[in-house]
Amino acid sequence: MTTRELTYVKAFNEGMHQIMAEDPDVFLIGEDVAGYGGVFHMFDGLLAEFGERRVKDTPIAEQAIIGLGVGAAARGLRPVCDLMFMDFVGVAMDQIFNQAAKMKYMFGGAVSVPLTITTAGGAGMSAAAQHSQSLEAWLAHVPGLKVAMPASPYDAKGLIVGAIRDDNPTIVVLNKKMLGVKGEVPEELYAIPFGQANVVTEGDDVTVVAIGRMVVEARKAAEALDKQGVSVELIDPRSVQPLDTETIVASVKKTNRVLIVHEAVEFGGIGAEISSQIQEQAFDYLDAPVARLAAPFAPVPYAPVLENAYVPDAARIEAAVRRLLERR
């Protein structure tokens, strides 16, 4: 494939353009997705290319957006419904967890719901407590939903294409603070299947499992630790539902120590589930307890200085790895 550098948001946008050109059953609805191109310009140019029949602005009505998407998907189309901020899934949660997630099961497999929900999560932009949350553990807990969190431009394009092609309801959570991050992205259309982790860096001393934007911070920490003689194997699950436990466990069996990092609150976070699966499948390989690094159990602060203290960063990941290596 021919690759070149794109930003995270441009890679996602290219994936949307290419999959909509490939499949006429794909359409997009949401608040400000047409004329404005989305609150973060994720959908720029789609209205001009595909017209208002396939790219439509909606009222501020999240329940209606997802309800329309569920019905259209059940009738054979492939809707992409944008909810702007991840925090807004709460407004449409009945449609998401009672309708989209369960319809295939309730009808004995006779109906598929190839619905894709796009949204933006994470802190770091002083958007305050109602526009900065990371709720992936909440969504991943619902049987029938698939949840991906791309951590690179390459994944942003590949995961949105994989989501739209999937015959099940999928949620793609972009990270607001990563929109301008650059990386190599193939020009051609490609899909990344959910449930396929990425081994970002290989190492021997410790495994770090990082979720979403924490992959970027963990990579900085891994580079700093490498200069100090510590070899880090960095795993990006890409999707938290389904979760590629096999790749994570194989890494832990090699390194014997593991740190899990996410920016959602620690209590009840996806890190707890990953930790449980590791101890169930690789307990005898552990030289130290599974460690977690996450946000404190509090709403996301508005003030930048407090928000910076709230979200894990490279320095704290590096320190957590050092503490882990000292444990016996």
Image (cartoon, helix red, strand yellow):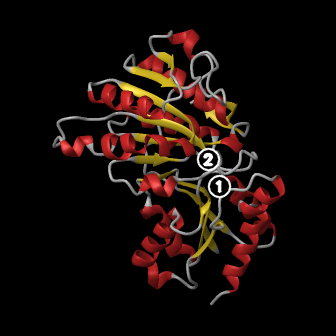
Residue 17 lies in quadrant: top right
Where residue 279 appears, as percent x and y from the top left, is 45, 78
Task: Identify the residue position indicated by label 2 in the image.
Answer: 151
Amino acid type indicated by mark 2: Ala
| Residue displayed at 49% across by 72% down | 275
- Quarter placement of the C terminus: bottom right
Q: Secondary structure at mark 2?
A: loop
Q: Residue at x 45, y 73 (%)?
A: 276
Q: Can residue 122 be seen in the rendering of this structure?
A: yes
Name the secondary structure under disc 1: helix
Q: Please report whichever mark, 1 or 2, sits nearer to the chain's N-terminal start.
A: 2
The one of 175 and 130 positioned closer to us in this rendering:
130
In this view of the protein, can residue 187 be seen by the observer? no
Disc 1 marks a residue whose amino acid type is Val
Q: Is residue 19 left or right of residue 204?
A: left
The label number, if any, that marks residue 215 in the structure image: 1
Which of these two is toward me, 259 or 253? 259
Percent coordinates x, y for residue 18 in the rendering:
51, 22
